[in-house]
Image (spheres, rainbow, N blue to C red):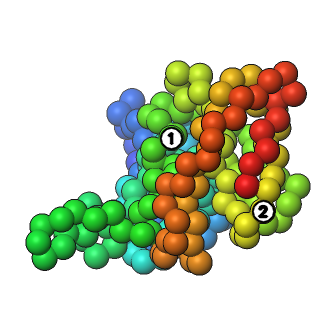
Amino acid sequence: VPYFDGIVGQSGARNYIKELSWHCYSDTGSNSSAAIAARGAEFGVRTVQSECWTTGNTFQALLQDLKNSRNAVWGMGPINANNGYYSVSANGDIVLRDRAKYFRQYYKYVRAGARRISARSSSDGLDPVAFINTDGRYVVVVKAAAAGSFTITNLPAGTYGIYSTTGPDPSSVTAFDVTAPDQTVGASGQLTTS
């Protein structure tokens, strides 16, 4: 934030600023990301976490940054480096890394231009984040600490797909992109799944 403040303080610079971009290495605490979000909102620019090439950069960091930093763009790492999305096997096969499989729950369904909306849980074990895509479709991604059923409320009527990826930790997957039957939500606005 101090760097951004120094730049916008220069005469005429504000006309050229479209985003506040940052890397996670120096301080990934929620206070810094909240300050980044506040400054982005104050100046009407989007926030972008464009580099965080560490093993600690998991979907949990993405979830926190979506909430705290209001990030419009967020990067896990290089495409095929050690901490990247893919690995390339000795025979040339491209393989999605386990850590990236959790990111896919966000990347595949939350589309460019989506608007984040409020989502909260009455359970400490469930951590949701919700969006409305530009086509009007709603997306709710829920980080669940343990298996179990839950109900999402206040959804518009329609048919919803349900997809999950599970594992023992943010870097290991036991079940990837599991598809449950679609559910139709009526006037109640409720969808129950597990």
Viewer-proximal residue, 49 or 7?
49
Say whether residue 115 is visible. yes
Instruction: Determine the residue located farthest toward the left in the rendered image.
Output: 91
**Residue located at (81% from left, 52% from top):** 150
Q: Position of 36 compared to 153: left or right?
A: left
Looking at numbered disc 2 in the image, what kind of residue is underneath it? Answer: Gly
What percent of the width, then of the height, locates residue 158?
69, 23
**Residue located at (59% from left, 22% from top):** 136
Q: Quadrant of residue 133?
A: top right
Up-down: is 136 above or below 111? above
What percent of the width, then of the height, locates residue 81?
24, 71
Say whether residue 39 is visible. no
**Residue located at (74% from left, 22% from top):** 157
Q: Which residue is mark 2?
A: 148
What percent of the width, then of the height, locates residue 92?
12, 67
What percent of the width, then of the height, locates residue 110?
51, 40
Q: Position of 107 compared to 82: left or right?
A: right
Other-residue count near label 1 (Cα within 10 Å), few / some / many at <14 / 14–19 / ≥20: some
Up-down: is 24 above or below 182? below
Q: Which residue is mark 1?
A: 109
Q: Give the SS element for disc 2.
A: loop
Looking at numbered disc 1 in the image, what kind of residue is underneath it? Answer: Tyr
Mark toward the viewer: 2 or 1: 2
